[in-house]
Amino acid sequence: MNNNATPLAKRRYIIAAVVVMIVSAYVVQLFNLQLMSPQYRDYADSNAFLRRTLYPARGAIYDRNGKLLVYNRPTYDVMMVVKEMKQFDTLDFCRTLNIDISRFYTLDTDMRDRRKNPGYSSYTQQLFMSQLNVEEYGLLQEKLYKFPGIYIQSRTERQYNYPGMGLILGYVAEVDQNKIASDPYYVRKDYVGKSGIELSHEEDLRGEKGVEILLRDAHGRVQGRYEEGMHDKAPVSGKDLTLGIDIELQAYGERLMHNKVGSIVMIDPKTGEVLCMVSAPTYDPVLLTGKSFGNNYLQLENNPFKPLINRAVAGTYPPGSTFKPTQGLIFLQEGIITPETHYSCYGGYPPLGGRPGCHAHASPLAIRYALATSCNSFFCYGFSGMLSNRSKYATPGAAFDVWRDYMVNMGFGYPLGVDLPSEKRGFIPNSKFYTNMFKTERWNAHNIISIAIGQGEILATPLQIANLGAMIANRGYFYTPHVVKEREDEALEKSYTTRRESGINRAHLDIIVEGMADAVTKGTCRGINLEPFIQACGKTGTSENPHGDDHSLFMGFAPKDDPQVAIAVVVENGRSGATNAVPVARLMMQKFFMGEIPESDQWLEATIINRDIRPYAYTRNLPASR
Amino acid sequence: MTYQGSNEIPEKGKVDKLTVIFYLFFVLLGWINIYAASFDLENATGLFDLSSRAGMQLIWIGTSFLLAFALLKIDTGFYETYAFLFYLAGILLLAVTLLVARDINGSHSWLIVGPVRLQPAEFMKFIIALALARVFNSYTFRLMEQKNLWLVAGIILLPVILVIAQSETGTALVYLSFILALYREGLPGGFLFMGIAAIIYFILGIRFSDEQMGALSKGEFITVILIIIFSAAMIWNYVKRIGTTVIFLLSAAAIFLLAFPVSLFSVKIDWGMVAIVALLFAALYLLFHFIRYRIRTYLYIFLFLAGSFAFIESAEYVFYDVLQPHQQMRIKVTLGMEQDLSGVGYHVGQSKIAIGSGGLKGKGFLNGTQTKLKYVPEQDTDFIFCTIGEEHGFIGSTAVLLLMTIFALRLFRLAERQTTVFGRTYGYGVASVFLFHMIVNIGMVIGITPVIGIPLPFFSYGGSSLWGFTILLFIFLRIDKSRRRN
C-alpha cells in the first residue's frame, strides 16, 4: 500500500508544523521564565534559604585601671516547636519553669497569636518564654528529654560589676523601627545600645553579625547546611573598650552626690580623658536589663529628679563666677586690660549704680586679686571697656562677636564632642542674638553686663566647665574630653587626640593661674586648699537660679604645676560655691591624689554624704499624694 | 504498492537504533533527575540504594529493559491477532480496578497485587492503539462510514468513561489524543478544526465571563465575533467564493460600524445585542445562500455557526454548574483569572519559581533547592521537569524539550514508513500519546496548560508509567522491524 500518494499523507506536515509551533511557544516561555524573570531567583532564595543570624558577643567595658565594668552573661530562652509536641506533661513543665498553669496558657496563646508574633509557624522554633537564669536553665535542661518540641536557645545579656554609672554606660534594648529603617545592619528583635557608651560606641561594641545559611523545606523545617556552610560567615566579636574613668573615683563621687542633684566631672588635662563623670541622681545599670526592664524604665522615667538625664553633658547652668577666668583671658589677650590695670569696686559696679553687687574686699584691684576675691565689678569694667572700645572695634556688636569667638575657642557654645550621646551645647549668644532681642543694633555693654559674670543668657554644661579647667591647666589648649580611652585593635578617633587651641597667649594664662591659685590660698575657695600636699587652683561660682536657691559651682585643677586633673562640680541649689561645690571638689581631689580621705577630713565627708539638698523645684508641681 | 520512501532504510530486520538510543537516554536522564529531585540533604543515599526513589526507579528500568527485550521477540502477527482480545481484557481490568481499588489520594486507579501497585489505565494506552490499528487495518475499512465512526468512537470512549470513573481525568484526556491518529487516517480536518474552535471558545468564553457587555458577557461577545470570522473562513475554504466571503464579513462589520457613530451621541449601545444581531444576520445570510444556490456547504456552515453559539452558551453553564470547584479553580488559575499562590496556584507558582530560578545554566546537579526541599509538589513524578529546569537551567530544559520533540517527530516518521495501515495507525497512536503527554506535562510545569496530573514519558518516577511507555514503544519498534521492504 503506497500511502505517500494519497492526499492524507500530507497531513503529517500539518501535524509536524503544529508540533513545532507548540514547542516554539514552550521555548519562548522557558526563555521568559529562566532568562527574563530575575524575580524567580529571589523568590527561590527567600523560599528555601534560612539565614540564621549568629550573634557576636558584645564588647566588654573596662575602667582605666583594667577593672571589668560591663560584660555578657548568658541567658536562656525557651523555644517551642508545636508540631513536635506530644505526650506533654504540662504540669511538670510548669513546675520546672516555676510558672503556674494559667501563665503557661497565657504564654502559649501569646506565642500563637499572629498579631503579637507575626512569624508564627507550628513547624519552627517559636519563643515561648524568655530570659531564664542559669538555675532555671539547669532544671529545664535536665528534664528536656521529657518535653519533645522544647528547645533552649542561649542569648547574652549585659551584666555589671558596679552598681553605679548607669548614665555613662547606658543600656541596650530591642532596636526600634526608626533605627531599623536608617541602618540596614539591624533587623527586628536585635539588641542595640540605647544610651551612654552603649549608644555612642554601638559600632565598636556590637561587632559583626555572622550568618549561617540553612536550607529549609516548604514547612520551614531545616534540612541541612547550604553547601556545607561554604557561604556561612562567622560572627566577629565586638571590641572591648577601656574607659578613662576610674571606677573608684566615680563610685566615690556618686556617693558624695547622694541626695543631691548635680554633677562632678574630672578630666585628665594632658589627654582629655574623663576620669569621672558623676551625674546625680543616677541609677544602677542592672535595673535596665532582664525581665523587669520595662517596669524599671518606667519608674526611672517617672522619677521627678530625672535620673535618666546625664547632667554632666546635658545639664546646662549659668556658669557664674567660674566663668570669670575666661573674661580675664579675653581682656588680657585683646589688650583691654594689662595685669596692672586696676578698677575700683564699691560693693558693686559703680556705672550702673552698684549693680551687679559685689562683696567686701580691697579696692581698687587688678586681675589677679579680682579672681581671688571674685570681684564682679572688675569684670564688668573689663567687659564694658571691651565693648565700648571704638578704636579697636567698629561697634559693640563687632566687639561682642570677637568676644564670642574666644568663648567658642575655649570650648563653650557648642557641644565639645564628647563620645556620649545627647551632649548639649550650652549657650553663648552672638551680636545678632542681642540685636534681635533688643530689636535694635544700638545696644551696649551695660545692657548685657551680667554676661561678664557668667549670668544672663550664658549657659554651660558641667563638662564644658571642667574642660575650661583643663584648658587653663594646660595653659591654653585642651583635648576634646572623651570617656573611652582605648578601643581594642583600633586607635581613638583623631578628634580625641588633636590639641584644640584657645588662641590665648600663655603669658596671660600664667596670670589667670596665679589668680586661681590665690583664690585657693587666700580667696573664695580656701576650702580646697590641700597644701602642703598639693597646690590646687580654682574658682568658685554661685549661679543665680530663678527656681530656687543658687547653684553651687566650682571649677579648678591641681596641681598648679604639671596638673594631673581638672574638675568641675555643680550642686543644684547648693547656694554659694564654697558651701557645697568646694567641699565636694576637695574630697574628690583627696580621693584622686591620696586614694582615701585623711582622718582630718572624714567629718567633712560624712557631712557632705548626709546632706540632703534635693531641689524643691523638681517636686513642687507633683500631685500632693506623693 | 511499491515503497517510495527515502533511501534511509535500515538493514532488514533491524530495530531502529536511533529510537532505542533516545529511549535509553531519556530513561537514564529521568533516573538521574529522580535521584536529584528526591535527594535528601540530611540522609543522602546513593544512586543505587534500593530504599530510595532512584533505587526503586532502577528496578523499574531494569524490568522495563527485560520487557522491551521480550516484546521484540514476539511476532508482529501476535499483536494483530489478539488486539481485540487485549482490548476486552483491558476493559475488564479497568472495570475490576474500578470496583476493587482502594481510594489513594482520591483516585481509584491502583490495582494492588502483593507488593506491586499497578495502574491498568497506563497499559490501556497501547491496548487502545492496537485495537484502533486492527480496526483500521481491515481491508474495506473507511473511517467516514457511519458504522465505522461509531465503532472507533466506542473503542476510544469506553475506556475514557471507565478511567474518568476512576477519577483519572488526565489519563482519560490522553486517550483522546488518538484523534490525531484518526486525523491521519482520514478524519476530516473540519472535525479537528471544530475541536480546536471549541477549545478557543471555551477559553475565551470562560476567561472573560465575569464582565458584562449588555446582553452578553464579554467572553460571549468575543466568541460571537470569532464565530463570524470562522464562518467567513469556512466559506472561503469550502465554497471557494472570495466575493461572498468579503460581502459576508463586510455586512457583519457594517452592523457594528452602524452602531458605533450612534454611541458617539452618548446613546447607550447594548453591544451584546449588536453582536447578536450581527450573528443573526450571518445565520440568515448562510441560510439564504443555501436555499438560493442549493449548495449544502452553506447549510453545514450555518450548522457550525449555530452549534458554536450553542456551545459557548452551554459552556458557561457546564463550567459553573457541572465542574467541581477545584476543577474550576485549576482552569481559572491557568487562565490567569485567579492568583492563588497558596492553593492550586501554589503548585504552578512553585514550579515556575523552581524553573525560573535556574537561569541560563542552572544551579548544577543536586544543587536545586526548590525541588529538593519539597516546595514543588510531586517533584519526581509529574513535576520532574522542574528539577531539570532548576538544576540545568535554560540550556538543559530547552535541550530536553527539543530532544523529546525530535523523538516525537522521529516516531511520526517511523509511522509514515510503515507498509501496513496497522503499523502506521499504531505508530501514530504511539506518537500521539507521547506528544500529548509531553505537551501537557511540560506545559503544566511552565504554567501554560492547566494542572493535569500526567507523567513526563520516560522521565517521571513510577513503574506503571515507565512500563506503559516501554510496551507502547517497543511493540511499535517490533512492528517497524518486521515491516515489508522491497
Image (cartoon, rainbow, N blue to C red):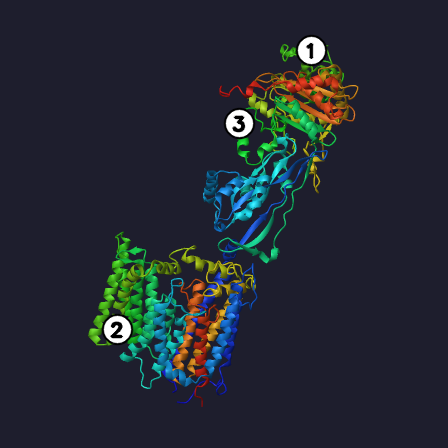
Instruction: Label 2: state its secondary structure.
Output: helix
Image location of residue A332, percent across then percent down: 73, 21
Q: Position of residue B19 (x, y in %)?
A: 49, 78
Q: Which mark is residue A302?
A: 3
Residue A426 occupies quadrant? top right
Q: Secondary structure at mark 1?
A: loop
Secondary structure at badge 3 equals helix
Q: Chain of mark 2?
A: B
Residue A55, image x, y percentages: 60, 45
Q: Is residue A399 visible?
A: no
Q: Residues within 10 Å of mark 3 (few under 14, many from 20)?
A: few
Gap in angstroms between the C-alphas marked 2 and 1: 128 Å
The quarter of the picture where the N terminus of chain B appears is: bottom left
Residue B300: which numbered mark, if any?
A: 2
* Total residue callouts: 3
Which residue appears farthest toward the left when viewing the image? B291
Q: Determine the image quadrant of residue A75.
A: top right
Residue A239 sits above or below residue B46 on the image = above
Residue A549 visible here: yes
Q: Are marks 3 and 2 on the same chain?
A: no
The kind of residue tagged 1 is Cys
* Residue in view at x 29 percent, y 79 percent: B148
Q: State the residue position of label 1.
A: A345
In the rendered view, does A278 fall on the left or right side of B35? right
Q: How far separated are the C-alphas under marks 3 and 1?
A: 48 Å
Q: Picture coordinates of residue B177 (x, y %)?
A: 38, 72
Q: Quadrant of the C terminus of chain B?
A: bottom left
Q: Residues within 10 Å of mark 2 (few under 14, many from 20)?
A: some
Looking at the image, is mark 3 or mark 1 earlier in the sequence?
A: 3
> Hey, what amino acid is under mark 3?
Asn
Residue at (43%, 67%) from the top-left corner? B441
